[in-house]
Amino acid sequence: MKQTDRVAGAGKTDRTDQVAAPARPRSPRVRRYHVGQQEIIQGDCLRILRRMKPESVDVIVTSPPYNIGLGYRSYQDRRTENDYLDWMVEIATAVRRVMRPDASFFLNIAGTSTEPWLPFELVVRLRDLFSLQNHISWVKSIAVPGDSFGHFKPVNSGRYLNRNHEHLFHLTLNGDVRLDRLGAGVPFKDKSNIARRGHAQDQRCRGDTWFVPYETVRDREQKFNHPGTFPVRLPELCIRLHGRPAPVVLDPFMGTGTTLLAAQRTGSHGIGIEIDPDYVAIARQRLKEAGES
């Protein structure tokens, strides 16, 4: 859950100047925790994914590191581009193994103003593993005549526009997964469309542009000192769109537990994998508090 509004080009080096990625640290001992129906596994996601039961997961919703230099506690978010892409293909291959034949994999990722190609380079590499069934634009801030909505963080640039959206790639094994489009739908604006178009309820498809704003926060502590989070509503919509009752939901980059909170809201069994013990502790506390409210 790794979004950014960095000033374009700030703190960057040219690709030709990038040094090789540091050696990966030895994986810590795996720990498991349960909060209600939600399971948290502390450890390296690639190692854990390779040990999970094949074809055991219905929905994957995740937002991996974006390789833009964010300050995670237990991960260096600046590899060479090829090393990063190779690593992500490894992760995606392991994810594919645990997907049921009709599973959905929702991959949230974004580029930066100076590195806009990275998300597309990644998804092209994934063509050998998945079909790109839908490409959803997650809109975080939008301007309409005379007003604006959502979280807007200005950048100081004479070349680039503010980046107000991120990508949500819906990947499936064969591109033929049936979805519950109304499960993630919206009411009709013009109610005459309900009867005129033969709909059984006041609900239509949300489409492939999702406006999901953040809750307003004023400091990093309100974001649990995590450099990139997404709203609970985003993974919740993904789970509802997939449309299976009581699905198994996986997030291999759990962070502070947002996808598991969405799983809890939807009556799903969530599995979250996270290498950082501090984020694991925050996720456990968030789930506990949500269950008590």
Image (cartoon, rainbow, N blue to C red):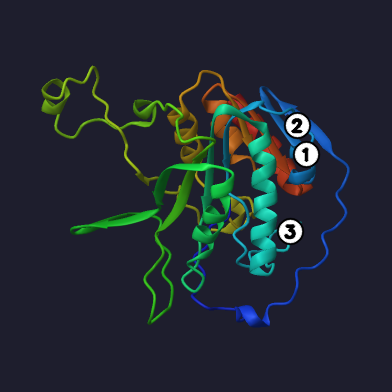
Tag 2 and tag 3, C-beta contact below 8 Å: no
Mark 1 or 3: in front is 1
Tag 1 and tag 2, C-beta contact below 8 Å: yes
Where, by quadrant of the figure, is residue 164 drawn? bottom left
Residue 52 marker? 2
Q: CA distance from mark 2 to mark 3?
A: 22 Å
To which residue does mark 1 refer? 48
Residue drawn where x is 49% and y is 74% of the image? 114
Mark positioned earlier in the residue sequence (1 or 3): 1
Spot occupied by residue 238 in the image (x, y as percentages of width and height): 47, 35
Give amino acid for label 1.
Answer: Ile
Instruction: Examine the rendering and report whether any part of residue 229 can be seen.
Output: no
To which residue does mark 3 refer? 75
**SS at badge 2:** loop
Looking at the image, residue 167 sits to the left or right of residue 205; the answer is right
Spot occupied by residue 81 in the image (x, y as percentages of width and height): 64, 67
Q: Decide: is 246 above or below 190.
A: above
* Of residues 172 and 281, the one drawn nearer to the viewer in this rendering: 172
Q: CA distance from mark 1 to mark 2?
A: 6 Å
